[in-house]
Image (spheres, rainbow, N blue to C red):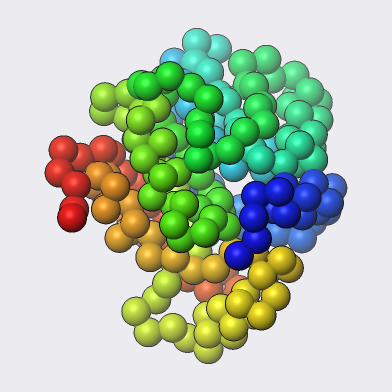
Amino acid sequence: MTDHNETRHNYDRLSRWYDFISGSSERPARMRGLQMLDVQIGEFVLEVGCGTGESLPVLNSCVGSTGKVIGLDLSAGMLGVAKDKLQKLRLSNVNCLQGDGLHLPFPDGSFDAIFMSFTLELLPAAEIPAVLCECKRVLRDGGRLGVASLVQREIPNWMERLYVWAHHRYPSAIDCRPIPLQDMVGRVGFENSQFQEMSMWGLAVGILAARPSTVIDE
């Protein structure tokens, strides 16, 4: 698994080409995730791993002039592309910040909703619970989490088996892998309110909307 510095470097390098390489294939699941998150006028929303900013204009239109959207990403290169898009659209209530999901630079209870798409599966398995706990910390009471991610099937098909093999063989080039999304989200204290599975390149993509619960699985 790549470390954070290597991940940052990889995405800085890919930033100008990322939309061409992955943008269209990821878009259906991302848009479905945004629909399920159901952001409302006046809400404060954080996107962790905002990448090239494809979701930010959509979130901006949802929160309106009285809301606020913040996009956070590890890669300065990806953020540069996102900021260019926002500048062209003249969106003033969206901010982009460089930062790490392991240590969100916000006070407790700052946001009504948090969105992540094709981000969690980039992280080492040991770090995913910490990132989800940070999301839970900065959500307000009654807040929502929306995630789109590659997910493990109970019985992997040939494409998933091939993809996982390639990930282990070439982790720098193929840096994400399917994860047990629902289980991971549930274990840190979220309850699924909606879950849907889609397909991308023959791989399963899970789209999830959840709220913090009062019971944490042991």
**Where on the picture, by quarter, is residue 40?**
top left
The quarter of the image holding the N terminus is: bottom right
Image location (x, y in percent) of residue 77: 79, 40
Would residue 9 be found to the left or right of residue 134 on screen?
A: right
Residue lying at the far top in this picture: please name it. 66
Q: Residue at x 54, y 55 (%)?
A: 123
What residue do we see at 50% from left, 64% from top?
150
Report the front residue among 133 and 38.
133
Q: Residue furthest left?
A: 215
Instruction: Find residue 86 and report its horizontal and vertical position in percent.
Output: 73, 27
Tell me if residue 218 can be seen: yes
- Relative side of 20 to 59, left or right: right
Q: Is residue 205 visible?
A: no
Residue 155 placement, left or right of 160: left
Q: Vertically, is 67 above or below 84?
A: above
What is the quadrant of the C terminus in the image?
bottom left
Residue at image location 56% in from the left, 78% down from the top: 164
Where residue 92 appears, as percent x and y from the top left, is 67, 15
**Residue 124 vs residue 109, the one in the foreground:** 124
- Give 146 or 212, whichever is nearer the viewer: 212
Quadrant assignment, res 135: top left
Q: What count of labels does the image hold?
A: 0
Look at 34% across and 57% down and name the residue there: 184
Which of these two is toward me, 37 or 121? 121
- Please provide percent x and percent y for residue 60: 57, 25
